Image (spheres, rainbow, N blue to C red):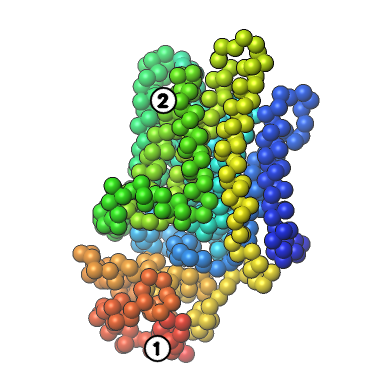
C-alpha cells in the first residue's frame, strides 16, 4: 500500500507539495489550538498529536531523499553504515572500526538498527537521522513548555521544526556524525532547564544525572561537540553553586549527580578500551590525530565569520533559518531587563550554547555545511526562549487600558512567529524538491553499481572486502564487511607524519582478514582520490607486493580496479 501511495505522490510535484504542506499545516494548527485558552478539552489538543504531526512533517518533506536508496554526495553516511555492519561481526571499536573524526556513539544507533531489522541501508539510516532531528524538536518543546506553558511552547518551536522539515539538503538529511551529539546536547539542555526550576526549589537530581550522562557521551560521538558539552556543564555547575536557597546538602547532591553522570560514560569507555587492548589505537587515532586534524585548518579564525556564511549558503535552507532566527533573538533580547530571573538565566544559557556551537562548527577550519547541524537546536532554543520571554514581558508593560496590553502581546507574538516561520516558508515554496521522481523508478530499492555486481561474482554477503581509496558504498551495496578497520585510506595516502604507521596497520589488518576481494578505488570519477600514480595502492610498496603475490586483477571499471584472491574463481 505504502509503495503505491509514494509512487502516486512521486509522479507529480503538485501532489507531493500538497501532501507535505498539508501535514505541516496540521502540525501548526495543533500548535495554535493548544495556545488558545482551553474550554472543553479536545483530542486534537493532545501533546501526542502534536508530537506525531511534528515527526510526520519532517518525514513528509524528506521522504523522497530518504527513499533515494543510494549514496548521495558525501561518503560519510556510507562509512558509518559499513562500520555498523562490521561492528555486528566484531564489536570492539578502534580494533574492528576506526571512525577517525567520529566515535562509537555515532555508529551504535545504526548497529542497533541492524540488530533490530536485520539490515541497514540508506533509507534506514536516514530514518534514524530524521528521528534524531525529531528528538531535538521535542527537547526544545519540553524546555519551552517548562518556561512558558505548553500552548506557547508549541508555537515557539515551529521555526526549529520547519528547518528540520524544509531543508532537504543531503548535508542534513543523510545520517551524519552531527546528529547524535546534537540530540545528546538537546536532551541535556532540556533536562537542565527543567531541573533548575524556581529559586529555592531542590533540583531534580535524576534529571541532572541523565543530563550528565548525555553530556559525557558527546565527545565519544564527535570530539567537535566537546566544547558545546563543556559549555552546558560549566553553566550548570555555576547555576547549581548559585542556588544558595536550596541548602548545602541539596547543592552537593545536585553537583554529584551532574558531574557523576558526566564522568561515568568516559570512564566506562576508557576502561573498556584499556581492557580490550586498543588503548594505543584509541589514543593515537582518536586523540592525537583529531588534534592534528583541527590544526590543519583551511581558513583562519579571522575568516571564520565568512566561512560560516559560506557554509550556510551551501546548506540549503539553513541561511534563511539562521539569519531570521538570530536577528529576531537579538531584537527580543533588547527587552531582557523585563525578563524574569529564570527567563534571563535561560536566555543566557541558550545564547552561550549558540556561540559555543558556532565556535565548534568553525574550529576544524573546513567548509563542510553538515557541521551546521550542531547549531540548529541552539539557535531554535535561543529564539524560543528570547521570543517567549519578550512576549511574556508585554504583560508587565504599564498600560492605561488592559486591551492595549493584550494588543501589544498579540502583536509581539505575531511579529516573532512571522519572522521565524515566514521566510522559511517563502524559501521552501520556491525550492525544488531533491530526489523527487526517483522513487517511481527505483521503488526505494538499494541501488547497486557495476563494480558491486562484479565483486559479488567472487564473494558472498557477509564476507570481507578490502578497499584502497575512499569508496565505502561498496560495502553497503555488496553486503560485505570491512577487511580493515579504516573506512577510507586517506591517512594511508596523505603525506602526514603518521602515514607509515597507518600503512603498516592497514596491511596487518588485511593479512589477518584475507578478504576474497580487494578493490583499488583510486581513479577518475571516484571520491577524493583520482590519480593512480600519486594515490594508487602502488605507492605502498609492501601492499603492492602482497597484492601481486596473493591476488589477481579481474576488472578495471568505473575508475576502480578489482582484485580477487588467487584461490577464488
Q: Is residue 412 above or below residue 128?
A: above
Q: Which residue is mark 1?
A: 553
Can you say whether 547 is above or below 353 in the image?
Answer: below
Residue carrying label 2: 254
Residue 548 x, y percent position in the rendering = 32, 87
Answer with mark 1 or mark 2, whichever residue precedes in sequence: 2
Determine the residue positioned at 48% across, 65% down.
73
Question: In screen coordinates, is 106 left or right of 496?
Answer: right
- Residue 538 placed where, x, y %? 29, 82
Q: How many marks?
A: 2
- Is any atom of residue 185 visible in this view? yes
In the structure shown, which secondary structural element does the residue marked by tag 2 occupy?
A: helix
* Disc 1 crowd, CA 10 A, few/some/many (<14, 14-19, 20+): some
Q: Is residue 495 left or right of residue 342?
A: left
Q: Determine crowd level at label 2: few under 14, some 14-19, many 20+ residues with C-alpha closer than 10 A.
A: many
Q: Nearer the viewer, mark 1 or mark 2?
A: 1
Amino acid at each position: 500500500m505504502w509503495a503505491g501511495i509514494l509512487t502516486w505522490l512521486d509522479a507529480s510535484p503538485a501532489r507531493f507539495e500538497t501532501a507535505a504542506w498539508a501535514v505541516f499545516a496540521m502540525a501548526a494548527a495543533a500548535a495554535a489550538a493548544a495556545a488558545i485558552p482551553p474550554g472543553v478539552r479536545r483530542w486534537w489538543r493532545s501533546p501526542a498529536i502534536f508530537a506525531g504531526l511534528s515527526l510526520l512533517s519532517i518525514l513528509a518533506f524528506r521522504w523522497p531523499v530518504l527513499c533515494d536508496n543510494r549514496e548521495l554526495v558525501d561518503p560519510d553516511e556510507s562509512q558509518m553504515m559499513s562500520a555498523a555492519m562490521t561492528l555486528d561481526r566484531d564489536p570492539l571499536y578502534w580494533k574492528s572500526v576506526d571512525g577517525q573524526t567520529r566515535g562509537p556513539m555515532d555508529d551504535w544507533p545504526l548497529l542497533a538498527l541492524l540488530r533490530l531489522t536485520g539490515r541497514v541501508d540508506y533509507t534506514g539510516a536516514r530514518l534514524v537521522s530524521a528521528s534524531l532531528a525529531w528528538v531535538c524538536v521535542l527537547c526544545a518543546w519540553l524546555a519551552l513548555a517548562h518556561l512558558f506553558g505548553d500552548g506557547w511552547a508549541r508555537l515557539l518551536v515551529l521555526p526549529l521544526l520547519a528547518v528540520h522539515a524544509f531543508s532537504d539538503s543531503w548535508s542534513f538529511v543523510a545520517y551524519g556524525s552531527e546528529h547524535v551529539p546534537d540530540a545528546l546536547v538537546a536532551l541535556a539542555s532540556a533536562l537542565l532547564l527543567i531541573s533548575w526550576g524556581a529559586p529555592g526549589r531542590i533540583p531534580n537530581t535524576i534529571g541532572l544525572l541523565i543530563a550528565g550522562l548525555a553530556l559525557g557521551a558527546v565527545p565519544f560521538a564527535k570530539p567537535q561537540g566537546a566544547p558545546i558539552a563543556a559549555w552546558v556543564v560549566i553553566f550548570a555547575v555555576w547555576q547549581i553553586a548559585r542556588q544558595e536557597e536550596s541548602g548545602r546538602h541539596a547543592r552537593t547532591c545536585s553537583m554529584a549527580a551532574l558531574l557523576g553522570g558526566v564522568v561515568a560514560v568516559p570512564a566506562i569507555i576508557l576502561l573498556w578500551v584499556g581492557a580490550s587492548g586498543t588503548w594505543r589505537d584509541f589514543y593515537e587515532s582518536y586523540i592525537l590525530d583529531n588534534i592534528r586534524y583541527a590544526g590543519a585548518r583551511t581558513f583562519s579564525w579571522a575568516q571564520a565569520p565568512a566561512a560560516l556564511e559560506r557554509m550556510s549558503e551551501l546548506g540549503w535552507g539553513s541561511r534563511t533559518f539562521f539569519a531570521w532566527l538570530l536577528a529576531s533573538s537579538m531584537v527580543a533580547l533588547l527587552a531582557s531587563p523585563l525578563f524574569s530571573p529564570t527567563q534571563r538565566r535561560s536566555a543566557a544559557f541558550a545564547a552561550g550554547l549558540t556561540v559555543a556551537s558556532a565556535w565548534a562548527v568553525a574550529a576544524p577550519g573546513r567548509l563542510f555545511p553538515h557541521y551546521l547541524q550542531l547549531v540548529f537546536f541552539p539557535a531554535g532554543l535561543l529564539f524560543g526562549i528570547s521570543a517567549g520571554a519578550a512576549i511574556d514581558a508585554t504583560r508587565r508593560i504599564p498600560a492605561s487600558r488592559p486591551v492595549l496590553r493584550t494588543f501589544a502581546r498579540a502583536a509581539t507574538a505575531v511579529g516573532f512567529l512571522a519572522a521565524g516561520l515566514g521566510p522559511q516558508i517563502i524559501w521552501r515554496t520556491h525550492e525544488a524538491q531533491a530526489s523527487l521522481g526517483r522513487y517511481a523508478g527505483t521503488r526505494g530499492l538499494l541501488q547497486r553499481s557495476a563494480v558491486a555486481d562484479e565483486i559479488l561474482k567472487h564473494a558472498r554477503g557477509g564476507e570481507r572486502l578490502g578497499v584502497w581509496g575512499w569508496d565505502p558504498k561498496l560495502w553497503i551495496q555488496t553486503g560485505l564487511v570491512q577487511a580493515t578497520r579504516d573506512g577510507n585510506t586517506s591517512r594511508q595516502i596523505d603525506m602526514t607524519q603518521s602515514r607509515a604507521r597507518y600503512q603498516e596497520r592497514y596491511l596487518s589488518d588485511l593479512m589477518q582478514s584475507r578478504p576474497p576481494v580487494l578493490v583499488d578505488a583510486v581513479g577518475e570519477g571516484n571520491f577524493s582520490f583520482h590519480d593512480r600514480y600519486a594515490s594508487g595502492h602502488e605507492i605502498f610498496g609492501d601492499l603492492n607486493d602482497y597484492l601481486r603475490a596473493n591476488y589477481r586483477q579481474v576488472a578495471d571499471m568505473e575508475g576502480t580496479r578489482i582484485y580477487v584472491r588467487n584461490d577464488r574463481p
